[in-house]
Image: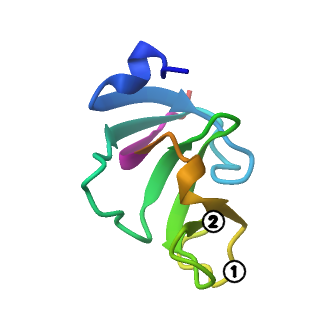
Amino acid sequence: QPLPPVLNCPTLVFSYSDDYLYPNSQKSILLLRKKTIAEEICYGNMYLIITDQLRLVRYVYKSPESPKKLLLNTMPESSVGEMTIERILIRSMWIVCTVIYRTT
């Protein structure tokens, strides 16, 4: 099934809240840039990961068990992955360029 039109744009800004990634700020705004297929993953950076079942923002790392998997963490530079995901399940990845924390 095709992605919604908004997810086919090269840049995107949206409001995001996550009890794990931003527990102290429920009103974050993310500025994202869509990763092209040929573009390398910038490991250690935050990405919006979109699969058929998930839409979440996590730090992305190489999986030590397989090049076909990625480690996703809520904490930067964590040695243990919160979850592992098969690369083939990922529909699109968006690198987080900026996070704006709203206070009101």
Residue flagged by tag 2: what amino acid is it? Asn
Looking at the image, which residue sits at the far top?
5
Residue 64 x/y as whole percent:
59, 85
Residue 51 x/y as whole percent:
60, 40
Residue 85 appears in which quarter of the rendering?
A: bottom right
* Residue at the (55%, 53%) spot, across then down: 88
As for residue 100 lying within the magenta part, the answer is yes
* Residue at the (44%, 71%) spot, across then down: 44
Main structural element of the magenta stretch: helix, strand or loop?
A: strand
Residue 38 appears in which quarter of the rendering?
A: bottom left
Q: Which of these two is toward me, 60 or 91?
A: 91
Q: Quadrant of the C terminus?
A: top right
Residue flagged by tag 1: what amino acid is it? Val
In the rendered view, would you say 99 is above or below 20? Answer: above
In the rendered view, would you say 63 is above or below 69? Answer: below
Q: Which of these two is toward me, 66 or 98?
A: 66
Q: Decide if residue 101 is on the left or right side of residue 81.
A: left
Q: Name the residue beneath numbered marker 1.
A: 80
Q: Name the residue beneath numbered marker 2.
A: 73
As for residue 70 lying within the magenta part, the answer is no
Q: What element carries label 1?
A: loop
In the rendered view, would you say 52 is above or below 5? Answer: below
Q: Quadrant of the N terminus?
A: top right
Q: Is mark 2 on a helix, strand or loop?
A: strand
- Of marks 2 and 1, which one's residue comes earlier in the chain? 2
Are the two marked residues, 2 and 1, in contact with CB atoms closer than 8 angstroms? Answer: yes
Q: Which colour scheme is used?
A: rainbow
Residue 92 x/y as whole percent:
45, 41
- Point out the stretch of residues depicted in magenta: 94-102
Give me the C-alpha separation between circle 2 and circle 1. 8 Å
